[in-house]
Image (tube, helix red, strand yellow):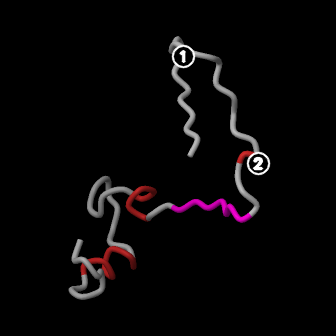
């Protein structure tokens, strides 16, 4: 696995941005987010409960209980 560190002033060669060819033909790109990352805490700054807040607070809906 190749990793890239982009720290200004770090010792070593200048890092190169990854290219599509650096990944195998079966590599799938993806991304994700969550309502908590976007919306913030449930009762802060006037925010009201969302559908996801209610779902996540219902016992048994989240497998590990988190």
Q: Which residues are magenta?
A: 26-32
Q: Is residue 37 left or right of residue 22?
A: left
Which residue is at a point 58% across and 41% down the rendered structure image? 2
What distance separates the C-alpha of mark 2 from that of mark 1?
24 Å
Residue behind mark 1: 8
Tell which of 45 and 5 is nearer to you.
5
Determine crowd level at label 2: few under 14, some 14-19, many 20+ residues with C-alpha closer than 10 A: few
Q: Earlier in the sequence, mark 2 or mark 1?
A: 1
Identify the main secondary structure in magenta: loop
Q: Is residue 58 left or right of residue 7?
A: left
Tell which of 56 and 17 is nearer to you.
17
Which residue is at a point 45% across and 57% down the rendered structure image? 38
Mark 2 or mark 1: which is in front?
2
SS for callout 1: loop
Q: Is residue 46 left or right of residue 11?
A: left
Q: Is residue 32 left or right of residue 25?
A: left
Residue behind mark 2: 20
Q: Mark number for residue 38?
A: none
Q: Position of residue 15 (x, y in %)?
A: 64, 25
Q: Is residue 49 above or below residue 10?
A: below
Q: Position of residue 33 (x, y in %)?
A: 49, 61
Per the image, is 49 magenta?
Answer: no
Callouts 2 and 1 close, C-beta under 8 Å: no
Q: Position of residue 36 (x, y in %)?
A: 38, 61
Q: State the image quarter where residue 17 is shown.
A: top right
């Amino acid at each position: 696995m190749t990793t890239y560190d982009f720290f200004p002033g770090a010792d070593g060669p200048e890092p190169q941005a990854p290219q599509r060819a650096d990944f195998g033909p079966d590599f799938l790109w993806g991304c994700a987010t969550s309502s908590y990352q976007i919306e913030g805490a449930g009762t802060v700054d006037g925010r009201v409960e969302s559908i996801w807040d209610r779902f996540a607070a219902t016992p048994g809906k989240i497998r590990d209980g988190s």
